Image (cartoon, rainbow, N blue to C red):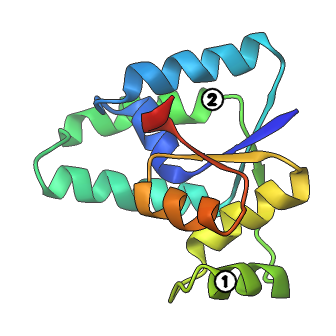
Amino acid sequence: MAVVLDANFLVALITPHPLRENATRLFRDWLAQDIDRHTPELARYEIANALTRLVVANLFPSEGLTQACAELAILPITYHQFIVEPRVIEIALTLRRNSAYDAAYLALAETLNAELWTLDGPLYRNASGQGFPVRLLGEF
Protein backbone atom coordinates (compact mmCIF):
# COMPACT_ATOMS: atom_id res chain seq x y z
CA MET A 1 0.00 0.00 0.00
CA ALA A 2 1.10 3.58 -0.64
CA VAL A 3 0.02 7.15 0.00
CA VAL A 4 0.76 10.35 -1.86
CA LEU A 5 1.21 13.49 0.23
CA ASP A 6 0.65 16.95 -1.13
CA ALA A 7 2.76 19.96 -0.24
CA ASN A 8 0.39 21.35 2.38
CA PHE A 9 0.45 18.02 4.24
CA LEU A 10 4.25 18.16 4.26
CA VAL A 11 4.23 21.80 5.38
CA ALA A 12 2.02 20.79 8.31
CA LEU A 13 4.67 18.24 9.31
CA ILE A 14 7.49 20.80 9.49
CA THR A 15 5.80 23.93 10.84
CA PRO A 16 3.68 24.71 13.91
CA HIS A 17 0.51 24.09 11.90
CA PRO A 18 -2.68 23.42 13.91
CA LEU A 19 -2.87 19.94 12.31
CA ARG A 20 0.81 19.10 12.86
CA GLU A 21 0.06 16.63 15.63
CA ASN A 22 -2.49 14.77 13.49
CA ALA A 23 -0.18 14.77 10.46
CA THR A 24 2.73 13.49 12.56
CA ARG A 25 0.66 10.74 14.15
CA LEU A 26 -0.61 9.60 10.76
CA PHE A 27 2.88 9.71 9.25
CA ARG A 28 4.23 7.58 12.13
CA ASP A 29 1.39 5.10 11.63
CA TRP A 30 2.34 4.78 7.96
CA LEU A 31 5.95 4.15 8.95
CA ALA A 32 4.93 1.49 11.47
CA GLN A 33 2.67 -0.18 8.92
CA ASP A 34 5.34 -0.02 6.20
CA ILE A 35 3.12 2.08 3.96
CA ASP A 36 5.15 3.80 1.25
CA ARG A 37 5.03 7.61 1.15
CA HIS A 38 5.31 9.46 -2.16
CA THR A 39 5.07 12.94 -3.62
CA PRO A 40 5.96 14.53 -6.94
CA GLU A 41 9.16 16.59 -7.12
CA LEU A 42 6.83 19.55 -7.61
CA ALA A 43 6.15 19.42 -3.85
CA ARG A 44 9.62 20.79 -3.08
CA TYR A 45 8.82 24.00 -4.96
CA GLU A 46 5.37 24.30 -3.44
CA ILE A 47 6.81 23.82 0.05
CA ALA A 48 9.38 26.57 -0.58
CA ASN A 49 6.56 28.80 -1.77
CA ALA A 50 4.42 28.01 1.28
CA LEU A 51 7.31 28.69 3.67
CA THR A 52 8.02 31.98 1.91
CA ARG A 53 4.39 33.02 2.29
CA LEU A 54 4.36 32.04 5.97
CA VAL A 55 7.50 34.10 6.67
CA VAL A 56 6.19 37.13 4.74
CA ALA A 57 2.89 36.93 6.66
CA ASN A 58 4.82 36.74 9.97
CA LEU A 59 3.26 33.34 10.67
CA PHE A 60 6.61 31.54 10.72
CA PRO A 61 9.97 32.97 11.83
CA SER A 62 12.70 33.10 9.21
CA GLU A 63 15.02 31.74 11.92
CA GLY A 64 13.01 28.50 11.80
CA LEU A 65 13.62 27.87 8.10
CA THR A 66 16.85 25.93 8.59
CA GLN A 67 15.18 23.56 11.05
CA ALA A 68 12.06 23.14 8.91
CA CYS A 69 14.14 22.35 5.82
CA ALA A 70 16.27 19.90 7.81
CA GLU A 71 13.12 18.14 9.04
CA LEU A 72 11.81 17.95 5.48
CA ALA A 73 15.12 16.54 4.23
CA ILE A 74 15.02 13.58 6.62
CA LEU A 75 11.39 12.62 6.02
CA PRO A 76 11.36 9.18 4.39
CA ILE A 77 9.43 10.08 1.26
CA THR A 78 10.00 9.06 -2.33
CA TYR A 79 10.04 12.06 -4.66
CA HIS A 80 8.94 11.41 -8.24
CA GLN A 81 10.17 13.38 -11.21
CA PHE A 82 7.29 15.21 -12.83
CA ILE A 83 6.77 14.43 -16.48
CA VAL A 84 4.23 16.36 -18.52
CA GLU A 85 1.72 13.87 -19.80
CA PRO A 86 -1.82 14.06 -21.13
CA ARG A 87 -3.32 12.42 -18.02
CA VAL A 88 -2.23 15.30 -15.79
CA ILE A 89 -3.92 17.77 -18.08
CA GLU A 90 -7.04 15.57 -18.34
CA ILE A 91 -7.30 15.49 -14.55
CA ALA A 92 -6.85 19.28 -14.32
CA LEU A 93 -9.61 19.76 -16.87
CA THR A 94 -11.87 17.27 -15.06
CA LEU A 95 -11.38 19.29 -11.87
CA ARG A 96 -12.04 22.48 -13.84
CA ARG A 97 -8.75 23.96 -12.68
CA ASN A 98 -6.74 26.63 -14.44
CA SER A 99 -3.51 24.96 -13.33
CA ALA A 100 -2.19 21.43 -13.20
CA TYR A 101 -0.50 21.48 -9.79
CA ASP A 102 -3.16 19.49 -7.94
CA ALA A 103 -3.57 17.21 -10.95
CA ALA A 104 0.10 16.20 -10.70
CA TYR A 105 -0.52 14.80 -7.20
CA LEU A 106 -3.70 13.04 -8.29
CA ALA A 107 -2.00 11.54 -11.35
CA LEU A 108 0.80 10.18 -9.16
CA ALA A 109 -1.75 8.69 -6.74
CA GLU A 110 -3.60 7.15 -9.67
CA THR A 111 -0.35 5.68 -11.08
CA LEU A 112 0.60 4.20 -7.71
CA ASN A 113 -2.94 3.04 -6.89
CA ALA A 114 -2.67 5.16 -3.76
CA GLU A 115 -4.67 7.74 -1.86
CA LEU A 116 -3.73 11.41 -1.99
CA TRP A 117 -3.67 13.03 1.45
CA THR A 118 -4.23 16.78 1.65
CA LEU A 119 -5.26 19.62 3.93
CA ASP A 120 -6.88 21.42 0.99
CA GLY A 121 -10.63 21.24 1.57
CA PRO A 122 -11.69 22.53 -1.87
CA LEU A 123 -9.34 20.07 -3.60
CA TYR A 124 -10.69 17.25 -1.46
CA ARG A 125 -14.33 18.07 -2.19
CA ASN A 126 -13.73 18.62 -5.90
CA ALA A 127 -11.53 15.55 -6.45
CA SER A 128 -13.51 13.15 -4.26
CA GLY A 129 -16.69 14.32 -6.00
CA GLN A 130 -15.08 13.25 -9.27
CA GLY A 131 -14.18 9.84 -7.83
CA PHE A 132 -10.47 10.42 -7.20
CA PRO A 133 -8.85 8.64 -4.23
CA VAL A 134 -8.25 11.61 -1.94
CA ARG A 135 -8.40 11.99 1.85
CA LEU A 136 -8.60 15.15 3.93
CA LEU A 137 -6.40 15.31 7.02
CA GLY A 138 -8.94 17.51 8.79
CA GLU A 139 -11.39 14.59 8.76
CA PHE A 140 -8.86 12.10 10.16
Element type where label 1 sits in the image? helix
* Residue 85 seen anywhere in this rendered image of the structure: no
Cα separation, mark 1 vs mark 2, equals: 32 Å
Comparing labels 1 and 2, the label whose residue is closer to the camera: 1
* Residue 67 seen anywhere in this rendered image of the structure: yes
Query: Type of residue at label 1?
Result: Thr
The residue where tag 2 is placed is 75
The answer to whether 77 is drawn above or below residue 113 in the figure is: above
Pointer 1 local density, CA inside 10 Å: few below 14, some 14–19, many at least 20? few
Q: Residue at x 67, y 14 (%)?
A: 29
Element type where label 2 sits in the image? loop
The answer to whether 71 is drawn above or below residue 138 in the figure is: above
- Measured as percent of width and height from the top left, residue 84 is found at 78, 83
The answer to whether 98 is drawn above or below residue 87 in the figure is: below
Give the quadrant of the N terminus: top right
Query: Type of residue at label 2?
Result: Leu
- Measured as percent of width and height from the top left, residue 34 is found at 84, 18
Pointer 2 local density, CA inside 10 Å: few below 14, some 14–19, many at least 20? few
User: Residue 94 got which mark?
Assistant: 1
- Measured as percent of width and height from the top left, residue 56 is found at 15, 58
Q: Residue furthest top?
A: 32
Q: Quadrant of residue 138?
A: top left
Q: Residue at x 48, y 61 (%)?
A: 46
Total numbered circles? 2
Q: Residue at x 65, y 88 (%)?
A: 93
- Measured as percent of width and height from the top left, residue 118 is found at 53, 47
Q: Quadrant of residue 102?
A: bottom right
